[in-house]
Image (tube, coloured by chain):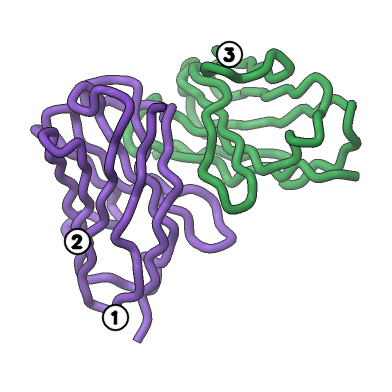
Chain colours: A purple, B green
Amino acid sequence: EEQLVESGGGLVQPGGSLRLSCAASGFTFSTYAIHWVRQAPGKGLEYVSAINSNGGSTYYANSVKGRFTISRDNSKNTLYLQMGSLRAEDIAVYYCARGTQLALLPDAFDIWGQGTMVTVSS
Amino acid sequence: EIVLTQSPATLSLSPGERATLSCRASQSVSRYLAWYQQKPGQAPRLLIYDASNRATGIPARFSGSGSGTDFTLTISSLEPEDFAVYYCQQRSNWPLAFGGGTKVEIK
């Protein structure tokens, strides 16, 4: 079964940092771009970031640019999102999602993880 | 930046009825529009990509149409498991964007 499983969410203080992970299984991880999408409580979906299949190209939404860093380790079939300078507006469930292409291109998402919750509060 | 507007916000229907959901883009996205279904506490699930192509395993009662700025998701006959929130998403240009969602609820 093709699967993505996020981990690493939790409670962090404003201005703090957190690293999310997304472990892939059941498919050839190194041949897909992977994306992060978040959803604030009771709200809609917001696109966050993406990385191409070999990790050489990345994209960030303006709302997280300069604060978040996406990376991947294809030897471990794992995607990461290093989150820094966290704010209340970053509170959300963070989903990793598989694109349909290798390259970093605007894409749809055919496999989603179950999500991991990030809470920012003092 | 492309903005997607979904309507209506809520659709109240009975099982067996036909559901018609709309997604309008602020500028043309060609046919690069996807639809997702999300149930409470679950991740979104891809239903339709590139306006009219059903994703793997999606029942034939789900269909998509449209191009340019106006798109429609139709559920021909609602099953109990179809009551959920539906989002459209454009993949024409960066930044990728989602619509605000339409909730299909049981009447």
Residue A58 picture location, percent across and down: 17, 38
Residue that badge 1 annotates:
A13
Quarter residue B64 falls in: top right
How far is mark 1 from mark 2, CA to CA?
15 Å
Residue that badge 3 annotates:
B52
The secondary element bearing badge 2 is classed as: loop
Name the quarter where the N terminus of chain B is drawn.
top left
Residue drawn at point x = 13 percent, y = 33 percent:
A74
The secondary element bearing badge 3 is classed as: loop
Residue drawn at point x = 73 percent, y = 22 percent:
B74
Label 2 crowd (10 A; few <14 / some 14-19 / many >=20): some
Asked if the residue at tag 2 contacts the one at tag 1, i.e. Cβ–Cβ closer than 8 Å, the answer is: no
Q: Nearer the viewer, residue A53 or A61?
A: A53
Residue type at tag 1: Gln
Label 1 crowd (10 A; few <14 / some 14-19 / many >=20): some
Foreground: disc 3 or disc 1: 1
Q: Are marks 3 and 1 on the same chain?
A: no
Residue type at tag 2: Arg
Asked if the residue at tag 1 contacts the one at tag 3, i.e. Cβ–Cβ closer than 8 Å, the answer is: no
Give the vertical position of B78 relative to B67 (above or below). below
Picture disc at residue A67: 2
B21 sits left or right of B2 in the view: right
Quarter residue A105 falls in: top left
- Label count reads 3
Give the vertical position of B83 relative to A21 (above or below). above
How far is mark 3 from mark 1, CA to CA?
44 Å
Picture disc at residue B77: none
Residue type at tag 3: Ser
Provide the chain ID for the residue under circle 3: B
Residue A103 picture location, percent across and down: 21, 22
Q: Nearer the viewer, residue B16 or A22?
A: A22
Name the quarter where the C terminus of chain B is drawn.
top right
